[in-house]
Amino acid sequence: MEVTMTHYLVLAALLFLTGMTGFIVRRNAIVMLMCVELMLAATNIVFAVFARAHADGGGHVFILMNFAIAAAEAAIGLAILVEIYRRRRTVNVDDLKALME
Amino acid sequence: MSFITDHILTWVTFLPLLGSLLLWTVVRRDDHARVFALAVALADFVLSLHLWFRYDGPGGQDMFTEKVAWLFGGKINYHLACDGISLVLVMLTTFLGPLVILSAWKAVTERVRDYMAMLLFLQAAMLGTFFARDMLLFYVFWEAMLIPMYFIIGIWGGQRRIYAAVKFFIFTMVGSVFMLVAILWMYFQAGGMGLEQFLALDLERQAQLWLFGAFILAFAIKVPVFPLHTWLPDAHVEAPTAGSVILAGVLLKMGTYGMLRFAMPLFPAGVEAFAPLMSILAVIGIIYGALVALVQPDIKKLVAYSSVSHLGFVVLGLFSLTPLGVAGGIFQMLAHGLSTGALFLLVGVIYERRHTREISEFGGLAHRMPGYATVFMITMLASVGLPGLAGFVGEFMILLGTFGSTTLDHPRLLTALAATGVVLGAIYMLWMYQRMFFGKLTNEKNRDLRDLSVREYAVLLPLVVFMFWLGVRPGMVLDRVEASVERVLAPLAVPASPHADDYPQHALGGGTADAPVFVVHEGEAHR
Amino acid sequence: METHANETLLRWIVLAPLLGAAVIGLLNRRLPRRVAGLLACATVGLSFALSVVVFLRMLGLDPEHRRLTDILASWVAYGNLRIDIGFAMDQLSAVMALVVTGVGFLIHVYSLGYMAHDDGFRRFFAYLNLFIFSMMTLVLGENLVMLFVGWEGVGLCSYLLISFWFDGEANAVAGKKAFVVNRIGDFGFLLGMFLIGVTLLPHLAPGEGAFSFAVMQHHAPLLAPVATAIGLLLFLGATGKSAQIPLYIWLPDAMAGPTPVSALIHAATMVTAGVYMIARMNFLYVLTPTAMAVVAAVGAATAIFAGTIALAQNDIKKVLAYSTVSQLGYMMLACGVGAFAMGIFHVMTHAFFKALLFLASGSVIHAMSHEQDMRVMGGLRRKLPVTWWTFLVGTLAIAGVFPLAGFFSKDEILWKTWSSGNTVLWVIGFLAAGLTAFYMMRLVSLTFFGTNRASEEVRHHIHESPATMTVPLVILAVLSIVGGWVGIPAFMGGGAHFEHWLEPVFAGGHAAGTHGAAHAVHDTTMEWILAGASVAWGVLGLLLGWIVYTRRLAVAEAGRRFAGGLPYRILENKYYVDEAYDGAFIRPGYRLSRTVLWKGIDAGLIDGLLVNGSALAVAVVASVLRLFQNGMVRFYAWSITVGLTVFVLYLSFSG
Amino acid sequence: METFLFWFCGAAMVLGGLMTVVQRSAVVSAVWLIFAFVAAAGIFALLHAPFVAILQVLVYAGAIMVLFLFVIMMLQGPVLEGERRRMKPALWPAVAIPPLAVLVLVGTRIADHGTAAFTTPLPAGFGSPTHVAELLLGRYLLAFELISIALLVAIIGALAIGKEERKLPWK
């Protein structure tokens, strides 16, 4: 069977859903961040697919942007986690209910 | 200087904002913050003087216009402009600005930097509201005012400050939301957010009624019109002095300004349908506010309710739909800004010394604080509309305008009822004054009160001077406002001749019966 | 409406006292007491001198052109509404100006002595000067609004001066009462002005000020259809300022102020402002017989009503106060029957003798160590000779004894009432005249005759007042004697100069106003008879008063106990009018405001039910929604997922 | 060949993703994620995006994941431990249904409409570093600069948050 655009997109969707589900299921904040990275990677694939489909390099540029965003997000997210861990001795989000109220 | 004068409105509006940003970022010490804020406010006042002296729109049109495409390729613009009506209110704002900052010199000791920054931020938002000629821009400024006021009440307020702040926020927010919906609806009709585009719309009557309702709700809450006024006493009582002064002095005028600038010219059919209701509510507000003020044990609450009463006059003047009534309303806005602003400052003075505002705690203060008593007396008299002071001219014009209104159902009855507010105003003010200042000094705690300090005189005397000045020379405001009022009222097309028919023709020598009541004589408007 | 002569001195007549007030008020303690006092007197003296100068200039003009104007600036100019800051003097305001500044000057001088030891000396003179300024604005105002400015200004000064000794609760309350009651009158005044404005504004030529007296007079025909309404509304204002029924209640209480204030403001000048205003608006009142009838009736009723109350008062100043109310009733009566000139004549003579009486009573009070109750006075005749003689002159003048000032004015008022056909009003006026004589003599008897009933210590301090106080008394006494001679009526062979002087002002009034007089026979015999009757009646009252209260005190006591003392108690308590107002308006109003409006509607209905009710509704909804706000990040993520899924499904099935 | 590579890389990615989610230990999860990212690089290569593919390995699988591992190591104990309890079985459907619904939807769509192939021919050098660099420093220069600012802010932010006891130079 020939590999078409649809194949790539379905692959991206699968990855995204996996990441999404992981984000909900996992309690470990670090793993949750990793799931976010997974979702970002899935969207990157979609960008690449459409860059290929339209023969437009703009999609690639956008992927690069996404990399930067992902890096920034990881940096900040992890910094926050470290700080939280220092104060609360846990990174289990179920124990972190400060958002409540 | 031309780089300032060419963009004078932007400078006037954003100078305080710039100041507040600098306060947050650069200035570190409290005493520096005070001086810096005062300097910024004074500079803003000086800049606005440029407007005052250069404004000479003979047709009352906008001047100093600045228009830059903002969003959606020019459908929404950064559009500031200034006509006579905006001008006088802007002057009031920039004039009160430095005084308010000076009044908070010692009263605020916590987070001074933030406080000053909030005041400047608030000033920028208010000025923007008066200048905006693009509905989205207007709405942005309008909502931006809420934020600093919310914090001023919520952080530096009294005992129940959170309740008051939330109440204030929710009340005003509820009205604004409806207005936003109306603005958006009209945006899609007009294809742009410009006020002039909105004015050019020819809306159906039914649509006008709904839209007018949405607009007027937002403005009526802000004014506040009876029965939407209950947030006001709470907000005033809990707000710190400077907050009260700004709230009473300028913020309340946003409501009446909005009615005059937007709600009334945009929806003539709505005005026609709602004017009777609004005028009746205004009259109820006048009497009701005065009666409730009468029984208040707390000075600040008394002054707050007196605001309800005074702004009832303004609303009545606006909805008389006569140029005289409307101009009187504008004048009353200024007069009220001065006198009530000063009253709140005076309450702040005594509160700083005694930390109470219960009238029963005082008595015989005139012995210890003759200067304070004198300034209080003058302010009170301005507030009750004594001729020669600012309050009289506005009330006189409003009542005369309402009396001759052709659009209201029972203009004379309404005027008569409103005029009872003048009597009641004297009663509650004088009674309060008598209980506070006259009699023997019985309360031991008042034994060692100091009279006004130099700084407090510096805050109050400019206000007193302007109370006299406006009272004796109202022309300086009226001349600048007159043509703009005609312009704003033009879409309403009020039938001009009221009671000419009541009079026997022979008495007039015939022929002159259908002369309009309030006409601007040729040439006179161009003074 | 012709061009009027310009006279820039007018502004200085008005502004000189203001200048004095400003300097004294601003410098206050930095100004030595003597300088402050002299400055105050000097500025008022200057006003008086200038008034005389202008008056003399006026005499040189031909009667038709005796109207001088001085426009300072435009005050309000909006559309075709024009109000100028300007002054005008015609014959009527000339009389008033001379009386106000003249009497005012004398009272200023008197106050130098009376207030010499008061802490608030400077403040007092600042207020007093401010009052003269306001009063002159009222009198010389070129238009009705300027008059109103002065009107409010004198009200303010009255308030400030009544509560001058603000230590006392009563003084402060009285001051507030005066201001508020006057404000009720102003309510009518304002509406009257609005009615004039709305009626005239459509018909004015450019540059005409709607409220200018000249313009109003010129356009009087336009006002004819609404003249009754305007007249009654303005009269409501006048009842407030001139203490007529039903708004007279503030004046007796106003006696709480220093005595010179009572003399100047609450007897000689301010309270006559209502009469002046009605005389000034005579061109309007002659258009409306209804309003005129009301004015006359209220005036007559007030005259007799206040006279009866005065019978039973024990406070020396209260008696004089009710006597003032009664005399003001006479003036209103005169205006009401169209005899405006006589009303003004009485204003003038009354200013002389009533100022005299008050100042003399002030001298008595001064001597009695600030005791005002006549029951503890008596026998002061010998100890205060100047006061005694001048007081006697004043009493005779007010009782209408020939040939003192009061006779001419009062007699003329009664005659005009009679000749206009208002017999009932004449009877009332005539009775009131006798009452006046009786209670004034009662006052004199209790104060100056008999034996002194004061305590030993007070008696020890009794002394005649200093020259600054007695000289004004003497001058006023002379004026009380000769003041009426400018208006000796024609039937006595006089020239009726006063009436002729004012004739141009009231020309319209005489043409149309004295509707009754037009067909009444001008019978000099009748005039003689009536004049004789009223003098006899007055003398009878005086004698009765003297006999009852000096020789036959038992008769007085019997009178007091007549019918169980009930009539006396009613009079002593002023017919319980204050209590009635209190019960009918003030208390219910307060209670309504407090319980119904504030606690009920504001806190209960609007805040409780609507505002907090909707807040409660929001809270209920929110408590449901809060189940979703559980602070669990993963739950939020799940919610987003569900939302997103639903959105995607919706998109794919809808498209 | 392309077909084979797609299925190979795709399977590897899905496997990597699933294992990331399923593994109890954060370290193991991270390793599986690196695996998935490397596979993703293969997918990028297949999509004619060689430059992106290289960066995916360098930046993502390299730098970012090293950062993750570093933090995990730094925090040690609790992170390395597995999660204490599993989700309640009752909640499984709630979690599973939305993604499954989407998958079903996608499936039905494909069944109805078939698949779409790439049709546009690609120019020579598409996706090469030269090509991407031209775009990045030309048409998208502004975005490039903005993202650099975003990164700068992130660096400062991370520093500010991570610095112990608020010993920041400006405090």
Image (cartoon, coloured by chain):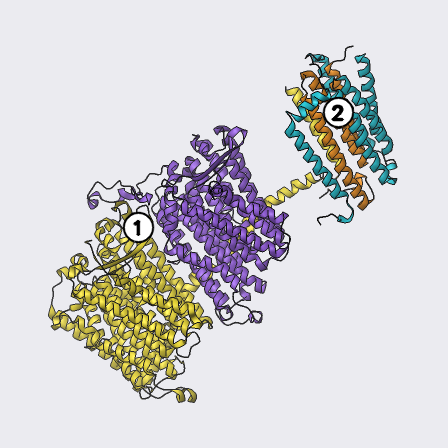
Chain colours: A orange, B purple, C yellow, D cyan
Up the image or down, B10 lies above or below A53; here it is below
For image coordinates 14% across by 73% down, the residue present is: C529
Q: Which residue is mark 1?
A: C82
- Mark 1: secondary structure: strand
Residue C650 x %, y %: 66, 23
Quadrant for residue C327, please give it. Answer: bottom left
Report the side of D156 relative to C547 (left or right): right
Foreground residue among C408 and C416: C408
Front position among marks 1 and 2: 2
Instruction: Check if mark 1's residue and mark 2's residue have beta carbons within 8 Å.
Output: no
Q: How far apart, in angstroms, are the residues tagged by discs 1 and 2?
A: 78 Å
Foreground residue among C263 and A43: A43
Residue C42 x %, y %: 32, 72
Q: Residues within 10 Å of mark 2 (few under 14, many from 20)?
A: many
Residue B37 x %, y %: 56, 52
Foreground residue among B322 and C597: B322
The chain that hosts pointer 2 is A
Foreground residue among B476 and C585: B476
Q: Which mark is residue A42?
A: 2
For image coordinates 40% across by 80% down, the residue present is: C370
The chain that hosts pointer 1 is C
Q: Amino acid at mark 2?
A: Ala
- Mark 2: secondary structure: helix
Q: Amino acid at mark 1?
A: Arg
Report the side of B494 relative to C484 (left or right): right
Considering the image in quadrants, where does the C terminus of chain C appear? top right
Quadrant for residue C348, please give it. Answer: bottom left
Q: Residues within 10 Å of mark 1 (few under 14, many from 20)?
A: some
Residue C637 visible in this rendered orientation of the protein = yes
Residue B397 x %, y %: 36, 50
